[in-house]
């Protein structure tokens, strides 16, 4: 690419890193900024300006290369670098268990306990009754068994880890019989066959995509069959001409041939959602009651806790899983344990405590309550009193998300915003770049905010974001 004389002049005007460092020394803003951050910011600003000049896609004047504008750019770069990458956002999408936005929120009481545990030493692996080393699994094992009805329990870092560890322990080098219609793919393109292959289990598919019968499982049993596996299709549903085998029947078959049976529930739950007018989802208690040897499920989806993989089932098999050396690589940390214990304690009296768990509260919110809050937000935005902005109340459908209850649409209410002379994509960009980003969705040329997933104290955040945006356009 040929460089014009003007471009050459502008490139020569670019100050060096050392020169800008000297200018920064005279500005109190940089007094407490680490030198590594300052130098990196300066280099970033200079390189960006150099690229702009060479590409000639923006009009750069000599004034913009003077000391004051460059120092201002360095300040903005420093602010960005000093801001934590992981930040709070407003989830206005209506997706309750949003994988990209951190999935389930923790209950207030759980957060308080988490702070206490995080700031002090704890009995993570210390048996206070005996004064000797203990097991971290014991922190939650008793209460998980109490709620689920299982003989034993343990927790690892996520459900994929729970499935992998269980398969590696029970069926390494042996055949695992599973219905073709249950070979699911979870987030990040991880698939049951891939997890099984890494565990050393040998996949034995039976049935077809839409129909599998008990005889298919029985015909597949051989001398080297190590496990009958059922995978709950929690993130999709096959409808129409379908047939599958119940866990209860699979357990009976397993007992006949003395082969263990495992169920991966995926988004496991302790709550019968049909009691709240939602779709029925199999509960952990029901799976354990069938006599399944192992049941695995997530802690951060329908359970409403932190990311974790929970394994419950027969004591003899759990004892083997706990002794597997791989368990150490997948073990859960103290903060996750604290959050999980705090969450599952609510399930001892869940009918009275369902509102204490944010995920369950959002899933069961009455439509009238959501509509009232939508009207409140609409009024707050209208009070900004800018004739360019048009605010409307709209009917929406929320989603559980997180690979749970795929057929369930939750009736909801939202607020749509249009601004005369401003594209909806521009509105979305400004909301994303707000100090506390607001994640909504675009429909029918409007920026849409679903009130099901917006917290009460986030309404002023949204109001301020739109007020600030309108002042600058």
Image: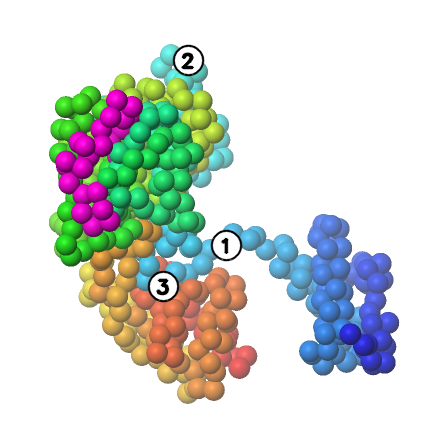
Q: Quadrant of residue 167?
A: top left
- Point out the image quarter for the N terminus: bottom right
1 and 3 marks in contact (CB < 8 Å): no
Answer few, some or many: residues within 10 Å of disc 3's Cα (few below 14, many 20 plus, some between 14 and 19): many
Label 1 vs 2, first from the N-terminus: 1
Question: Number of numbered discs present?
Answer: 3
- Assign a secondary structure to mark 2: loop
Q: Quadrant of residue 393?
A: bottom left
Q: Depth check: 406 or 399 in front?
A: 406
Label 1 belongs to which residue?
87
The CA span between labels 1 and 2 is 40 Å
Q: Where does the image place residue 458, in percent across and percent down from the top left?
A: 39, 62
The CA span between labels 1 and 3 is 17 Å
Foreground tag (1 vs 3): 3
The circle on residue 187 is none
Q: Where does the image place residue 424, in percent across and percent down from the top left?
A: 44, 78
Label 2 belongs to which residue?
131
Span of residues in magenta: 207-229
Q: Depth check: 68 or 360 in front?
A: 360
Label 3 belongs to which residue?
93
Q: Residue at x 41, y 87 (%)?
A: 387
Q: Depth check: 370 or 173 in front?
A: 173
Label 1 vs 3, first from the N-terminus: 1
């Amino acid at each position: 690419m040929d460089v014009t004389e003007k471009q050459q002049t502008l490139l020569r005007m670019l100050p060096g890193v050392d020169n800008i460092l000297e200018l920064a020394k005279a500005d109190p803003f940089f007094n407490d900024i680490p030198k590594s951050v300052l130098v990196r910011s300066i280099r970033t600003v200079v390189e960006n300006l150099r690229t702009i000049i060479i590409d000639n896609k923006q009009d750069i004047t000599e004034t913009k290369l003077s000391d004051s504008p460059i120092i201002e750019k360095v300040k903005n770069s420093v602010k960005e670098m000093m801001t934590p990458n992981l930040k709070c956002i407003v989830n206005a999408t209506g997706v309750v268990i949003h994988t990209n936005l951190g999935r389930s929120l923790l209950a207030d009481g759980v957060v308080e306990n988490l702070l206490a545990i995080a700031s002090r030493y704890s009995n993570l692996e210390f048996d206070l009754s005996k004064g000797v080393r203990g097991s971290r699994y014991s922190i939650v094992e008793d209460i998980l068994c109490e709620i689920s009805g299982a003989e034993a329990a343990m927790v690892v870092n996520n459900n994929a880890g729970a499935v992998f560890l269980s398969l590696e322990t029970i069926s390494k080098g042996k055949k695992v019989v599973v219905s073709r219609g249950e070979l699911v793919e979870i987030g990040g393109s991880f698939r049951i066959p891939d997890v099984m292959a890494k565990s050393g289990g040998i996949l034995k598919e039976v049935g077809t995509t839409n129909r599998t019968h008990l005889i298919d499982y029985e015909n597949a049993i051989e001398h080297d069959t190590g496990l009958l596996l059922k995978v709950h299709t929690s993130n999709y549903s096959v409808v129409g001409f379908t047939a599958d085998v119940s866990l209860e029947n699979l357990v009976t078959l397993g007992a006949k041939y003395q082969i263990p049976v495992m169920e991966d529930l995926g988004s496991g739950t302790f709550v019968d959602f049909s009691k709240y007018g939602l779709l029925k989802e199999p509960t952990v208690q029901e799976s354990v009651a069938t006599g399944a040897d192992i049941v695995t499920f997530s802690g951060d989806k329908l359970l409403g806790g932190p990311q974790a993989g929970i394994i419950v089932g027969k004591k003899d098999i759990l004892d083997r899983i706990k002794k597997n050396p791989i368990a150490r690589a997948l073990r859960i940390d103290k903060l996750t344990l604290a959050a999980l214990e705090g969450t599952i304690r609510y399930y001892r009296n869940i009918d009275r405590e369902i509102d204490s768990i944010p995920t369950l509260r959002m899933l069961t919110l009455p439509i009238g309550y959501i509509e009232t809050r939508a009207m409140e937000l609409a009024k707050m935005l209208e009070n900004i009193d800018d004739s360019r902005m048009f605010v409307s109340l709209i009917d929406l459908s929320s989603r559980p998300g997180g690979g749970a209850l795929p057929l369930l649409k939750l009736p909801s209410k939202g607020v749509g915003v249009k601004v005369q002379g401003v594209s909806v994509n521009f509105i979305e960009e400004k909301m994303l770049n707000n100090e506390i980003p607001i994640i909504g969705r675009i429909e029918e040329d409007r920026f849409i905010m679903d009130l099901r997933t917006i917290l009460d104290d986030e309404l002023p955040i949204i109001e301020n974001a739109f007020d600030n945006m309108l002042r600058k356009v």
